[in-house]
Each structure stands twice: as C-alpha cells, then as structure tokens.
Amino acid sequence: MLPTERALAESMGVSRTVIREAIRIMVDNNVLELQDGLSYVRQLSFDEIVNNISKTVNPDEISMIEIMEVRSVLENYIVKKAVEHITEEQINELQD
C-alpha cells in the first residue's frame, strides 16, 4: 500500500495534484490498483515490467548504460528491503 497523497506530496516536495496524476498514470498502466481510496502496488510479472518500461522509455533519449544504472539502484533497494523483512525460516531455507 502506498502512503497517502498528502504524505507522498510532502516527502517528494510536490503538490498533491502531481501525485494524483502520477497515480492515475500508474493505474492506467496497471502498476497500481485502487481499493477503497487507497493505492496498492500490483505484483507484476516480468513481461508486464518490461512492457511498462518499453512504453515509457524512448531509446533516442536514454542509453542502455542509464537503464543499467537505474537497475543497479533498484536491485540494491530490493536487496535492502528483503534483508529487512526476511524471517528466520527463510534464512534457514536459504542455508539449506
């Protein structure tokens, strides 16, 4: 679940209008879904992720190196979150 529009706007230093528009775009691209006024990130398949990126990335404006730099940042963030939320049972499974 995403934070409220107000919290997102404050943390990013933008207006709620900007946040609403970003949420609308992500809903239109099936990245988010709205339920009872709350925004939830959908679990996307690999193909959906690639499709969303290809719709938004213009190869004339961004290089493969820039894409890889973004990927590196995302991967580091994902690992950090995984480490924060891993359970003892999951650690044992990995060790096995």
Image (cartoon, rainbow, N blue to C red):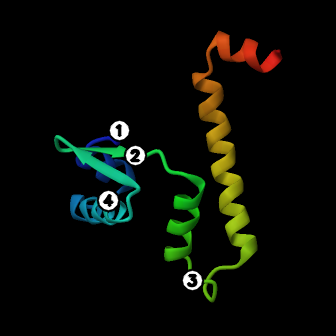
Tag 1 near tag 2, CB within 8 Å: yes
Asked whether 73 or 15 is in front, the reply is 73
Which of pointers 4 and 2 lies earlier in the amino acid sequence?
Answer: 4
10 Å crowding of disc 2: few (<14), some (14-19), many (20+): some
Name the front one of labels 3 and 4.
Answer: 4
Q: Distance between the residues labelled 3 and 4?
A: 21 Å
- Side of 31 where 79 appears, left or right: right
Which quadrant: the N terminus? top left
Q: Which mark is residue 1?
A: 1
Q: Where is residue 38 in the image (x, y as percent from the top left)?
A: 23, 42
Per the image, the residue denoted by label 3 is: 58
Alpha-carbon span between mark 1 and mark 3: 29 Å
Picture residue at 27% right of the left edge, 63% below the top:
24
Which of the marked residues, 1 or 2, is nearer the chain's N terminus?
1
The three-letter code of the residue at mark 1 reads Met
The disc, 3 or 2, on the residue closer to the chain's N-terminal end is: 2
Question: Foreground residue, 32 or 80?
Answer: 32
| Residue type for callout 4 | Val
Query: Which amino acid is tagged 3?
Result: Asn
